[in-house]
Amino acid sequence: MIKSLLNLLLCVLLCTVSRPAFADDIELGGLVLDRTISRFGKDFAFYYAGYWRDMPATDGVTVVIYEQVYPQAGTFLWVEMNQNRIYQTYFGRRYNDVKQMAEQAVLLSVNELANIQAAKMVGEELSEQRNKE
């Protein structure tokens, strides 16, 4: 029993050592990280992530949704894509149309995603492109 387990472990080890190129080929799809804490922020992240899942060509793109809560005033929320702020909004303490705000953020994300893909096709970094503007 132990001998067969050691043989299996040795085979797995040899397979991973003989094919190190696979580690370079693994690329995660577009990630949406939720850094929100309030109910409005969680709802926004839920709707945004739902729309984001339907978008094609999000490989290697990371979206982070941040939130800063001000107890007497409301919530300041912003969305960053690849560490560039692309959307920001303010939620008051009362009812807000969170779904509509998430849709606006997704539309701006589509535009930013198109810019990222165009920069990849041309072969230049997006940060270099922004510095030229």
Image (cartoon, rainbow, N blue to C red):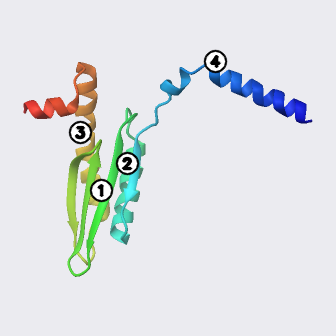
Q: How many residues crowd around disc 2 within 10 Å: few (fewer than 14), some, or many (20 or more)?
A: some
- In the depicted view, which residue is nearer to us: 115 or 3? 3
Quarter where residue 54 is shown: top left
Mark 4 lies on a secondary structure that is: helix
Quadrant including the C terminus: top left
Considering only order in the chain, which callout, 1 or 3, is on the residue closer to the N terminus?
1
Instruction: Kindly indicate whether the residue at mark 2 contacts the one at mark 3 (C-beta within 8 angstroms).
Output: no
Give me the residue at 72% from left, 27% from top. 12
Q: Which residue is mark 3?
A: 112
Q: Nearer the viewer, mark 3 or mark 1?
A: 3
- In the depicted view, which residue is nearer to us: 3 or 78? 3
Q: Amino acid at mark 3?
A: Glu
Distance between the alpha carbons at the discs numbered 3 and 1 = 15 Å
Instruction: Kindly indicate whether the residue at mark 2 contacts the one at mark 4 (C-beta within 8 angstroms).
Output: no
Q: Nearer the viewer, mark 4 or mark 2?
A: 4
Q: Is residue 91 above or below residue 93?
A: above
Considering only order in the chain, which callout, 4 or 3, is on the residue closer to the N terminus?
4
Q: Amino acid at mark 4?
A: Ser
Q: How many residues crowd around disc 4 within 10 Å: few (fewer than 14), some, or many (20 or more)?
A: few
Q: Is residue 85 above or below residue 90?
A: above
Distance between the alpha carbons at the discs numbered 1 and 2 = 9 Å
Distance between the alpha carbons at the discs numbered 3 and 2 = 15 Å
Considering only order in the chain, which callout, 4 or 1, is on the residue closer to the N terminus?
4
Considering only order in the chain, which callout, 2 or 3, is on the residue closer to the N terminus?
2
Image coordinates of residue 30 in percent, x first then y, are: 40, 40
Mark 1 lies on a secondary structure that is: helix
Q: Which residue is mark 2?
A: 51
Side of 129 relative to 11 (left or right): left
Q: Which residue is mark 1?
A: 102
Considering only order in the chain, which callout, 2 or 4, is on the residue closer to the N terminus?
4
